Amino acid sequence: MMRHEGALSITGAAWLASANYAGYLAGALLPLLISIPVYRGIRWGLVIICLGTIAMGFVQTLGGWMVLRAVTGIGSAWVLIFVSAWCLDHLKHVGRLVLNGAVFAGVGAGILVTGLLCLAFMKAKMTSTQAWVGLGSLAILSTALIWPVTRAIPKSERKLPSVRRWNLEASRLILCYGVFGFSYMIPATFLPAMAQRIVSDPGVFGWMWPAFGAAAMVSTLVAAGTGKRMGNRQLWIASQLLMAVGVALPALWHHLCSIVVAALLVGSTFMVTSMVAVQEARQVAGRDPTPLISAMTTCFAIGQVIGPLLASKLPHLGDEFAGSLLLASFLLLLSACTLIRGGPGPLAPQKNTFGSPADPIHPRLHSPS
């Protein structure tokens, strides 16, 4: 909408995306450097997202937009890190592990609602300024509705260990999660553009993003039960393999159907990967998984920044995105192989990566394999 109005060029859009990814990286790094209580990280993250989104409708310069997108990226990282750390632990304590999928389904639901609203805004001939204010207002309303829930978050200060010992398994998770960030971001960034080259009608190619979100929402709900049977590591590997197929497909078959299938495959696996990766981090890290989750999110953010930038530098192989898509698919396959070679599955005993005693409330951590 901003580009159609002449308010933003393709280069400007790339700068906005880079600013958002850089903010996400900064937000992932901060919990590693300073002690941020979980309840504050969640609340501040939500408030930052709300204010940063609605303010986009009141700023009219590229520089101002870049600042707002960077700040909003910080809030996004905090919400993912701290909500994951708190909710998964809380659900385990109350015996409602099946709801793990609902936590991560929120991301897909947000993508779906945003995509549908933007299609409706365009149909209603609304301006991009009005769209930003509308989306920001919805974010504020949603945050107000869930704010009472944040009162249940423990208020105790979480002190990060002064020394963190990264063993091979923790390093493996961090690296594979970074590869995931690099690989998923390329199709997530360019799928609508790929569809637009084939079908110019925004009423058609505009559905790629809602389809992506719907797949992400449904898959996380389904995977919550599947992961209990398969194990987090096995489900992570399966998701990487499916995503590799989805990423490579548009490079090998130039058709709208391949774009749709790619949107569904990548959309249905990207939040499942996030969910099981966080759960796997909890198994490896023990009592306090937040530092490991933060480190994984940092590496993910680095990959997220590099992915779109590298996409414009690789040989096109006869197609604008083919080279970067095939590279991303290859890295996903390599990452899956690395996870296969990784440490024992979720039922085997694990040691706390960070040197403190293993969490006594994790019976799996102490049971014989």
Image: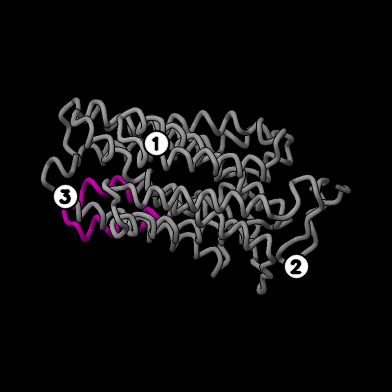
Q: How packed is label 2: few (under 14 Cα within 10 Å), some, or many (20 or more)? A: some
Quarter placement of the N terminus: top left
Could you tell me residue 314's position as x and y percent? 32, 58
The single residue placed furthest to the right in the displayed view is 368
Q: Residue at x 59, y 35 (%)?
A: 101
Asked if the stretch drawn in magenta spans residue 182, the answer is no
The single residue placed furthest to the left in the displayed view is 6
SS class of the residue under badge 3? loop
In the image, taking residue 74 as reference, residue 117 lies left or right, namely: left
Magenta span: 52-74
Q: Please, is residue 61 above or below residue 84 in the view? A: below
* Cα distance between the residues tagged 2 and 1: 38 Å
Residue 114 makes an appearance in the image: no
Q: Residue at x 68, y 64 (%)?
A: 168
The residue labelled by disc 1 is 111
Could you tell me residue 218's position as x and y percent? 51, 28
| Residue 8 disc label | 3
Q: If you read the primary sequence from the N terminus, does the residue marked by circle 2 or circle 1 appear first?
A: 1
* Cα distance between the residues tagged 3 and 2: 50 Å
Tag 3: amino acid? Leu
Tag 1: amino acid? Ile
Q: How packed is label 1: few (under 14 Cα within 10 Å), some, or many (20 or more)? A: some
* Cα distance between the residues tagged 1 and 3: 22 Å
| Residue 241 disc label | none
Could you tell me residue 94's position as x and y percent? 73, 37
Per the picture, the main secondary structure of the magenta-coloured stretch is helix
Residue 102 makes an appearance in the image: yes
Tag 2: amino acid? Gly
The residue labelled by disc 2 is 355
